[in-house]
């Protein structure tokens, strides 16, 4: 029987892991002047779309648990990017909202990150096709792992 194996560079999982790490490095460099990390930037992206979000909603959108999210949000609050407030009707619920600093820096941060993306050779519709393919792959993997 013929042995079938794939080399490391032929593994989709390894390619995705490698590109993810490289994106992190690229974004880390772009966000350094703002003293933001890549995960903090993702929080800001969600809040720039809709401020005033519960921590649990942020966690769902970012696929992060509250144990990871809470310390990150505390650092963001200490650095002046967000406000954390308890919901009046239920003290257990914490609402995250953008600070004036985050609102004022939105365009500048976005332009810095966008500058990284323009250096890539992925153009227009190819960019969105690639996102769609990766998102579809993510959904398929979630369905497979959910059924186990």
Image (cartoon, helix red, strand yellow):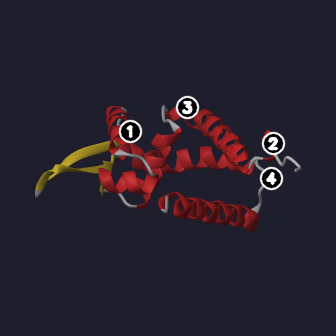
On the image, numbered disc 1 is attached to which residue?
Answer: 68
The mark closer to the camera, 2 or 4, is 2
The residues bearing labels 2 and 4 have C-alpha atoms spaced at a distance of: 21 Å
Please indicate whether residue 78 sits to the left or right of residue 107 in the image: left
The image position of residue 146, as x and y in percent, is: 48, 60
On the image, numbered disc 3 is attached to which residue?
Answer: 32
x 31%, y 53%: residue: 56
> Does residue 88 appear in this view?
no
Disc with the residue nearer the chain's start (1 vs 4): 1
Direction left: furthest residue: 89
The mark closer to the camera, 1 or 2, is 2
Please indicate whether residue 41 sits to the left or right of residue 121 in the image: left
On the image, numbered disc 4 is attached to which residue?
Answer: 121
- Residue 9 to residue 75: above or below: below
> Does residue 115 appear in this view?
yes
Badge 1 density bin: few <14, some 14–19, many ≥20, Cα 10 Å: few
The image position of residue 60, as x and y in percent, is: 39, 56
Badge 4 density bin: few <14, some 14–19, many ≥20, Cα 10 Å: few
The image position of residue 133, as x and y in percent, is: 68, 64
The image position of residue 45, as x and y in percent, is: 47, 53
x 87%, y 50%: residue: 1
Badge number at residue 9:
2
The residues bearing labels 3 and 2 have C-alpha atoms spaced at a distance of: 31 Å
Q: Which of 37 and 60 is in front in this view?
A: 60
Disc with the residue nearer the chain's start (3 vs 1): 3
């Amino acid at each position: 029987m013929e042995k079938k194996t794939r080399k490391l560079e032929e593994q989709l999982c390894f390619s995705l892991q490698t590109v993810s790490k490289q994106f992190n490095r690229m974004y880390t460099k772009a966000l350094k002047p703002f003293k933001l990390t890549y995960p903090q930037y993702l929080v800001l992206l969600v809040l720039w779309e809709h401020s005033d979000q519960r921590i649990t909603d942020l966690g769902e959108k970012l696929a992060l648990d509250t144990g990871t999210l809470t310390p990150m949000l505390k650092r963001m609050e200490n650095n002046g990017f967000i406000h954390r407030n308890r919901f009046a009707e239920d003290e257990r619920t914490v609402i995250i909202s953008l600070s004036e600093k985050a609102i004022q820096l939105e365009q500048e941060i976005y332009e810095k990150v966008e500058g990284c993306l323009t250096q890539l050779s992925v153009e227009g519709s190819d960019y969105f096709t690639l996102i769609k393919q990766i998102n579809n792959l993510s959904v398929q993997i979630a369905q497979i792992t959910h059924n186990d």
